[in-house]
Image: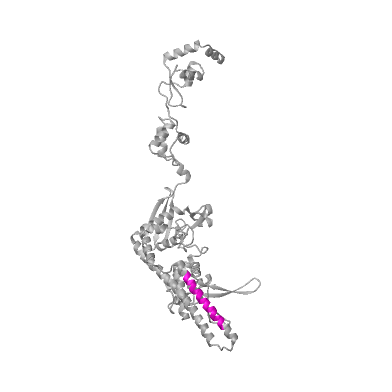
Amino acid sequence: LDPDEEVRSVVKFLFETFKEKGSTYGVVQKFGHLKVKFPKRAYGGVWKGKLIWGHPTYVRIRSILKNPSYAGAYVYGRYRSRKTISTDGTICSKIELQPMPSWQVLIKDHHEGYISWEEYLHNLAILQQNQPKGVETMLNGAAREGLALLQGVLICGVCGKRMTVHYGGNKGLYPIYECNWRKREGLTGKSCLTFRCDIVDEAVAKRILEVLKPDQIEIAMKAVDELERRNKATQNQWLMRIQRAEYEAQLAQRRYEEVDPSNRLVAATLEKRWDDALVNLEQVKQQLHEFRQREHLELTPEQRKNIFALAQDLPRLWKAPATQTKDRKRMIRLLIKDITVEKLLEPKRLILHIRWQGGAREDIYFDLPLKIADRLRYSKEMVDRVRELAQNLPDDKVAETLNLEGRMSAMGRPFNITMIRNIRRVYSIPSAVLKRSGELTVKEVAEKLEVNPNVIYYWIKQEYLKARRVKNGLPYWITLDSKDEEKLRERVLNSYKLQNKKNEHS
């Protein structure tokens, strides 16, 4: 086993993983998940110059990604020592990282690198974008967890800064895109833009599925090739671990066999090291077996067939429960560079200026949902229809007519008399005028005959008066001719009870 070849393989795997994950933490997590060890050179002590394999740390991975030596460049002046004098007179030295234009020496293609200089600059840009508390940027950040699909992709059309995501509601299940940069800087008293995530995410996802539809089979082939390439790289790391464990076991065996048997203490120590190496070899093989069963590194013909079947139905793949939100975000970043958002007040709508990765540009317009008060408010056309019907029909007939026309209330329910009364009250719609020409009310007849209105109701019940009533609960409309009026006046004069009440009232 060539240690240098193994080191080169692991470093290449690191850069490939960063290209796949897009973040330093993603690389660390995958190395830990795969149990891939990473080398470092020991400095000083009895292990000076020896390679030590262990779990990679965030700082270690980030330093490699930012080191131009891995891109084949020779650099001098990346760091500079600066001395300062404190208030108590103490001289302090501080090492500061210098920007690239300040490097004293930069020789590209000085030696063979793991990545090209363009890839190195691209990695630096990604690391800069991934800083959540760094300088404001208009570029995409890493695809993170969360329900907002366009996190890090949206740009505010007011101030030009990248929009953030606010998770509110019950346990943060309702994400909202917002931009508070101008408010945070004290330039205004309100947010630049604020709108719900789901309506924008659905519009962009729908457009992406429409764009990808003609090339689904080609995408499936590339996806299968990419999975096989990643599986092969992962498999190679496991094989190298086994080779290293076998080499250490063989080396321990040779040392044990070459020792003088008379030196029992040394022989026992070497025998124990040989046993430990054999145990470690078996453990690595067992871990590889378990990992293969858990991760299914090799794609079977049946799995390939299933992948092609899913590719033919990309919407199902997009909406599948097994597809994580983080994976959907990566798919979006492969196609979309950024989206600038503008908001119109009249009418209330959003304009999404999409900039695709290939350089094409496209605008999507869609109306924003109304506020709950506006959604429950009746339209002008509905109010005018109620006003028209109320001129000749009572409230119950108005409700019945609207239901026959197939109209629904603001809450999506059939109309009833209470709803019609509320509409008339809110919009000041008078009730229907059901009185015909020449008809009198009960009060008018009672005043004319100088009796109590209850007497008029009694006469109507006894059919002494001709009265019309549209329905129970509505007023009577009385037709009183001269003959009926004369008869009723005689009835009043001949009634001792009515006369007494009349005199008492007088």
Residue 416: percent from left, percent from top? 45, 35
Toward the viewer: 311 or 385? Answer: 311
Is residue 500 something that shows in the picture?
yes
Residue 381: percent from left, percent from top? 40, 39
Residue 79: percent from left, percent from top? 53, 75
Compared with residue 367, is residue 264 higher up or lower down, i.e. above or below? Answer: below
Is residue 47 something that shows in the picture?
no
Toward the viewer: 109 or 345? Answer: 109
Residue at 50%, 10% (x, y): give it.
494
Q: Quadrant of the C terminus?
A: top right
Compared with residue 300, is residue 490 higher up or lower down, i.e. above or below? Answer: above
Instruction: Magenta stretch: give its range.
Output: 270-290
Residue at 46%, 25% (x, y): give it.
475
Q: Main secondary structure of the magenta part?
A: helix
Q: Is residue 285 magenta?
A: yes
Q: Looking at the image, which residue sits at the far right?
A: 88
Toward the viewer: 185 or 3? Answer: 3
